[in-house]
Amino acid sequence: MTTFSSAVFPVETMDVPGGSETIVRGARHLFASLPRAFEGVRRIGVLGWGPQGRAQALNLRDSLAGTDVTVAVGLRPGSSSVAAARAEGFSEEDGTLGDWLAVAGSSDLVLLLIADSALATHYRDVFAALRPGTTIGLSHGFLLGHLREVGDDWPSEVSVIAVCPKGMGDSLRRLYVQGAEINGSGINSSFAVEVDHDGRATDRALAWSIGLGSPYTFQTTLSSEYLSDIVGERGILLGAVHGIVESLYQRFRLGGVDTVEAYERSSENITGPIARAISDGGLAHVRDVLAPEQREVFDRAYTASYRPAREVLVEIYDEVASGTELRSVVLAGQRLAHTPMTQISGSPMWSYADDVRAQRAQRNLPIDPFTAGVFVAVMTAQVDLFAERGHPWSEIVNESVIEAVDSLLPYMHARDVAYMVDNCSTTARLGTRRWGPRFQAVLEQIAYPVADSGAAADEALIKAFLTNPVHEALAAAAALRPPVDISLA
């Protein structure tokens, strides 16, 4: 289990299966302690203005208002984001907006939030610009994986920390703004200390996380975060969702239902009532609210889907751990510099999304038991894989459940899964396009024929689900969740 201490922030112990974890509960009254925790940091440079760059720059600037710690945004020459950063109040005149290497060289904490492929290409330029004593900040472990792949290392006399919000950048900003008025809502974050040259890295990372508005912050390692993050976005957070909804839509259409009902029972069901049920009561709650005859349908779908999904997830994990997945992202980034990526939204099912959304006010959509069984099976398979590979429970439930139901699925509900895929980071988008069809294939070719064969559900798998330690871990994490849902208005 993970344990750490802080000289600035109060730490708590959270009971999890098999032991406990040390966490810090975020709160706005802690903003007053940020300058002390940021000792030695008078300028934070945020490199990049993608979803995470924008959200983190704005959140940190707001949290540090009135202190002597400034936040500056650094952008590459010719960046199309300059006007957007200016519109949010960053400017060349006051030194809070500038060339990315100049900002890197003049900052004490440099947050590397540019696109992964660009970071892989230009990280040496950034490293060369840093002053001794600077702290590098990362929001996931891609760069660590790349350095290992190419046999390179961090610059000397520099600390390296990570704070990794468990949600997309837009969610991070929206919930932070909501948190000013409603229960301090925000996005949970993990933190990691990779290199600590001055003994202050832990408090610096915690200050960064609290400044982002994280309700609770838990410890991991950069290597563990890299694996869970990249696998998760190819799994239940994005890639698997795409494959599941496409396969279910086709299944329902072949079963004779019309296009709108097929969409409602697939994508709309997962992003709406199923996601809300998990968020409100956990994974087992989805099954508990079903009528007895519906539970039989859930159980058949669950036990037919669990093992095929687990096999794909194991393959993804091993591809990420071996560096194969990372190499594909770097190579794709080089290709995409000349040829834009095509979109997946041309698939027929997405043409009915507007019709379904238009009918929401008149419909109270019930949980479809078959869809619920499939989705919960894939989510549980990812949980079990992460637990088997030794990830801490806070990381497991955030990367496999909380980030999905409290950040990503609400956005998919508002806009649709295809929109999310076509507008996410290049790394996540590439992974979804590679692995989403794999999930679709194993469900259509292996899981659904078993579910339709008339065979009874595997009682051992259902018992394993009902007694899974994830329920205990989710309950502990839920106690730290502010009771507010993200506003997408």
Image: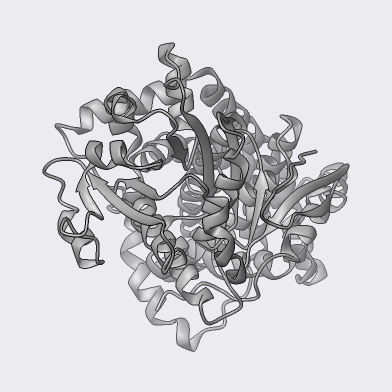
Name the colouring of the figure.
one colour
The quarter of the displayed image where residue 353 is located: bottom left
The image position of residue 27, as x and y in percent, is 62, 68
Residue at the far bottom: name it.
Answer: 362
Residue in view at x 37 percent, y 66 percent: 415
Q: Nearer the viewer, residue 456 or 196?
A: 196
Residue in view at x 32 percent, y 41 percent: 114
Q: Measured along the vertical axis of the image, is residue 88 above or below residue 205?
A: below
Q: Nearer the viewer, residue 371 or 25?
A: 25
The image position of residue 219, as x and y in percent, is 67, 43
Residue at the far top: name it.
Answer: 151
Q: Is residue 398 something that shows in the picture? A: yes
Q: Is residue 452 something that shows in the picture? A: no
The quarter of the displayed image where residue 134 is located: top left
Q: Nearer the viewer, residue 354 or 163?
A: 163
Q: Nearer the viewer, residue 90 or 419?
A: 90
Residue 20 lies left or right of residue 375; in this view the side is right
Residue 283 lies left or right of residue 101; in this view the side is right
Quadrant that contains the C terminus? bottom left
Residue in view at x 78 percent, y 50 percent: 470
Q: Measured along the vertical axis of the image, is residue 178 above or below residue 58?
A: below
Residue 273 lies left or right of residue 307; in this view the side is left
Residue at the far left: name it.
Answer: 78
The image position of residue 145, as x and y in percent, is 48, 24
